[in-house]
Amino acid sequence: MDIREVKTKRSIKNAFLQLRAHKPLERITIKELAALAQISKATFYLHYRDIYDLSSQMQNEVVQDILDGILSSGISLLDTVRLSQELFRGFHSNQALIGILFSGNQAAVLPDSIEKVIKEYLFREHPEYENDMELNVLLTYRIYGGYYAYSKNFKQFDLDQVLDMVDAIARQEQSGMKILQEKESRLFSSSLAHQQQETSTRPGKEKTAPFPSGKTGTV
């Protein structure tokens, strides 16, 4: 790729990010993007089929960057605890682009794509696990759970704190000590104790006892 092509594609991508930050994907036109990038529409079509092709290629670059970061960490993708942590780091380091490229109706594209590339890579290296139900379910759980846990909490909590929490949850799951189960158990016990206390302090109903004649009356 020559320097002119590199500069042109960079201009197109920068213009797209500016527009995408304020507009849903389906409302961006080639005309306005070309004007902002200072290129002709014909030049755009030399590089991309349409606006969706451009968006998809840029999304794939983010997904590949996250995967490269995971692989460069040296972890095994079979270690789903470490995988969860590296996914969080990958989401965090690409947050600016994720917030633009995967906003709106594109939000679900990221975890879908991450799952696809991780499983493709893992099963290419370890084909014996491709039909392993437990591993497939666990990977899906880690990837989707990790993504939504991060996206809902990254603005409120420090990354290292979240990573420590992810590690604690994962390891307690492995040892059969589930944090959520324990919390639910405590909440249930507290609710049950409260109900029992209300029942014990509530005035009782009048009891009835039989009269000798067989009629009943209050006692």
Image: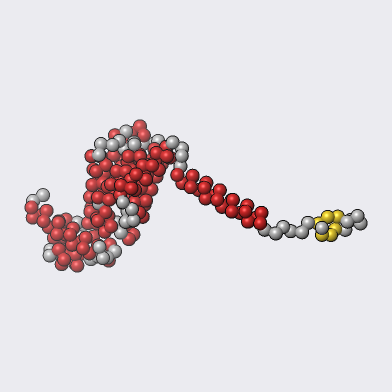
Q: Residue furthest top?
A: 128
**Image spot of residue 33 (x, y percent):** 19, 64
Q: Quadrant of the C terminus?
A: bottom right
In the foreground, 72 or 175: 175
* Residue in the image at 40% along x and 35% along y: 132
Which residue is at the front of the view, 215 or 112? 215
> Is residue 127 left or right of 198 when viewed as pictured?
left
Nearer to me, 201 or 52: 201
At 43% across and 40% down in the image, what residue appears? 173
Name the residue at the front extreme. 201
Q: Position of residue 96 (x, y in %)?
A: 24, 56
Residue drawn at x 32%, y 33% is: 126
Q: Is residue 217 left or right of residue 168?
A: right
* Residue 206 shows in the view: yes
Please count the marks in the image: 0
Name the image quarter holding residue 217: bottom right
- The residue sitting at the right extreme is 213
Residue placed at 59% from the left, 50% from the top?
Answer: 193
Question: Residue 161, how many percent across, how many down?
Answer: 33, 48
Figure coloring? secondary structure
Residue 88 at least partly seen: no
Q: Which quadrant of the figure has residue 20?
A: bottom left
In this rendering, the answer to whether 195 lies above or below 120 is below
Image location (x, y in percent) of residue 63: 26, 48
